[in-house]
Amino acid sequence: MTMGFVAARPSGAVSTARVSHPTYAVPAYLTPVSIPKATSEHYERAYFLMNDLATAALNVAQVQGASYADVRVVERTTEGISVKNGNVDGIASGTARGFNVRVLVNGAWGFAASAIMTTQEAERVAAQAVRIARASGMAAGTPARLSPLAPQRGTYTTPIQIDPFQVPLDDKIRLLLDADAAMRSVAGIAVATGNMEYAREQKLFMSTEGSAVTQTLYDCGAAIVAVAVDAQSGEMQQRSYPNSFGRQAGTAGYEFVTAMHLAENAPRIAEEAVKLLTAKQLEPGVRTIILDGPQVAIQVHESCGHPIELDRVLGMEAGFVGKSFLTTDKLGHYMYGSEHVNIVADATTPLALGSFGWDDEGVPAQSTNIVSNGLFTGYLMSRDTAPLLGLSSNGCVRADGWNRLPMIRMPNVSLQPGTWKLDDLIADTADGLYLCTNRSWSIDNLRLNFQFATEVGWEIKDGKLGAMVKNPTYTGITPEFWRSCDAVCDRDHWVVWGTPNCGKGEPMQAMRTGHGAAPARFRDVRTGVGALK
Amino acid sequence: MQLNERDIRALCQQILSYSQADQTEVLFLGNQSALTRFAVNHIHQNVADEDAQVSIRCVVGKRVGVVNTNALDEATLRATVARASEIARRQPENPEWRSLPGPAPLSHAPAFSEATAAYTPEARAQAVQTIIKLAKDKGFEAAGAFETNVQHIAVANSLGVWAYEPRTEAECHAVVMADDNGSGYTQRMGTDASTFDVEAMAREAVETADRSRNPIELEIGEYETVLDTYAVAEMIQNLAFMGLNAQAQREGHGPFVGRLGQPVAAPAITLANDPLNPLTMAASFDFEGQPIQRTTLIDHGTAKAVISDSFNALLEDQPNTGNALPAPNTWGPLALNLALAAGDQSLAELIKGVERGIYVTRFHYTNPVHPVKAIFTGMTRDGTFLIEHGEVTRPVKSFRFVQGIFEALRDVRGIGREQRLAKDYVPVLAPALHVGAWSFTGVQREVQ
């Protein structure tokens, strides 16, 4: 059995934990990168236009009373290809561009955005943002304060080897159709699908504090899914590769997709989907479980990544998805997990989907220790939340496109590798389950009570993988679960998994986050809850 | 930006004239959106944006390309049309493709409200102030959002389709927290923001918050349950997401697979997609400019029909119910005007019918566990109570549940007469339900 995406991992996907930057010195890797020749003329024209817009907006905002203002001018081009059962199911390409102005007036925030790229419109939108901020003042809280930030200048471009937009469309379609055919070569597959998506985002950030940074960010990803159906029993089972719900993605070029070897892995997942139809149902019980990397990644995302968002902790999301059990009194004092649990938030991890040069408040990308040997040590912060704890922003603010408010978002929140080889970990497990690839997730409004389902599970008996089980679920309470972690696999098994569709905020924003993870073992976990009949 | 039918139609016709493809479609979406968000008893996020974008679908033989842009200058639009055609030409033919849809007569939908279109940031702030004041008066904390949107949607295609409709949407919700364990909820949505009685909304959330303090931890297990409107709407939304459509049906992974024509719910249950019902977010046409038909999905307990779009309808030679999403759509058609028929009981009467059970205000973070078996999981939130001898007696800690939707619908023992439009991701008009058994599998619990 091939272990997920490990075998196909692009080289260099592994990062080491870094110590947080105590000051906002610009890291060496943020030195200017030359703009690719093919787009430089277009880009330079666009840059001057963006610069004029931003300057006009900042001037009007200040004249009308803003104590602070910033502008983001963004152009994002996305292309997506979907195939199904041997046919092209959809190909779409799109460009969305526009700008937004965020202002602070008497300590209250206002925000407005427009897609009309003229200086007159920039001035109108800046004035609108000021009016909105004054309306916010009608129900004002404690005036917002921003943590200090030295003026930022520079350019950052995602390092890529192959520009996915330059790869002929036919080649990209063929790659997916080959994987599709390989899945359908297995008898019993009712639906085979594949998808690929890649994007280029160019953006300028300018503020009244003198920052002006430009970034060109690329992301690229793909996945395949095989669905098997038994019409008579009403059973449906699926297997996905490299992961489920969207695709495996990174800040990378087309080389990231070819390294997945989709067609080579397609027959395996198709066979597993068909076998699942007749696999035995997992019965309820308390068991030892080993989660594969993709499932550890979503477990980290939901039960660590979201509860460490300081805006959520402070109640800013209480009207929507909720708050967090990781209240500020717990910082530096609370055992989140066992000694084997080390979690880092790092926006500089190479190839990871949540990597960038600066966040959308102009704070440089950096790394923060979140959980150190089980102890809860850090939050994801913005410039207006960090001062409430006497801290400075650690650069975790991003916006989903030109018309959305920047807010605290996970960069790459990763469980650091441990020391085990997966084969040794299985051999060390007398009685348990090996659970792979997420199928369903749910967590409560404090991020405590969770339930996950995976696509497939295997029994572990006397240190060996045994029978396949279908519809596996497990449930727990976040700190109890992480405190029960007694082993994490090592760097050879560690991959940064991309989550291209993390939802937060109102209006809802979808963000790209990354999660480094290796298989990990947890003891005494409730499994098979609500066993399906 | 001032948008009107004449200018939008001229823009769409201009784009169609640039195309050399066999068939071409333009979907125009112009939005003016504003949202005031509040938390910890103050406005902390307050946003507005304006956008107009076109999505151009070109068909060459049996090949389809889609490109969208929000840069509406002539050079960009010509390039966008050319790119959509190029994408179509550079792919293999899809033998399942038939055609873009042709024109069909449209009804008028009550989709637009001048009052919503004229709503100001000051008016939203004033409404928020009211909610915050009522929470503060009790020493409670309020969080939520008030959103007003104007959308101009138009579809034109080379087969003669022309559809245009201005629509408005307003939504306001709040969570009021008495303390770490006691909270309440309120939500209203509709086309007309001026109809929201925010004082009544605030009272609803404050009263539930007050009553839900100091919850007891109840044993997990199956309980007779009264689901209030918010919870029922979210359950029905899950059913829609599992795939009540022709595509999921054909591919064998939707909840009606093997169930069409079969009883799936109690005889009193009727679920329809009801686009002209003024209590839903009314709309006359879908994202292909096709009339949205009233479609009864569950008719007096029997699984009756699934919804479709032009691709699925033409492929299966069935009538199009008009539930297309914007192309390309790999999810399949989606019902955006779902309405579960009302019953004849008040909420108090539904509760009165329960000897010992649970009352659920709303769900939280629900997700399908098995789409064919129609099983979903989630938490209860913002007011979960014990019912004893026909009365709500004590608050209980939020539960996790894992529940088959059809199992619950088959055992419906009472239906509320008041319907409410509630939205998690898609709006659903729903009454409260009394169900015979609901499977609670876990409890929210803090760990020191």
Image: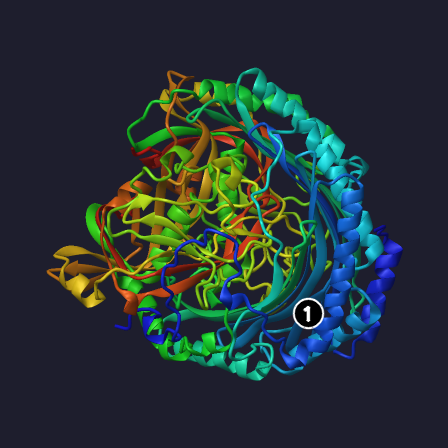
For label 1, the SS is strand
What is the tally of numbered marks visible in this picture?
1
Q: According to the image, what is the colour scheme of the structure?
A: rainbow
Picture coordinates of residue B203 (x, y %)? 59, 20
As drawn, A111 above or below B381: below
Q: Residue at x 14, y 55 (%)?
A: A431
Q: Position of residue A398 (x, y in %)?
A: 57, 53
For disc 1, the marked residue is B67
Could you say which is closer to the camera, residue A426 or residue A126? A126
Quarter of the image that includes the C terminus of chain B: top left
Foreground residue among B164 and A176: A176
* Residue A235 location (% of width, % of height): 35, 58
Any part of residue A397 in sight: yes
Q: Quadrant of residue A46?
A: bottom right
Q: Residue at x 37, y 16 (%)?
A: B389
The image shows residue B261 at horizontal and vertical percentages of: 48, 51
- Left or right of residue B394, residue B89 in this image: right
Query: Mark 1 is on which residue type?
Result: Val
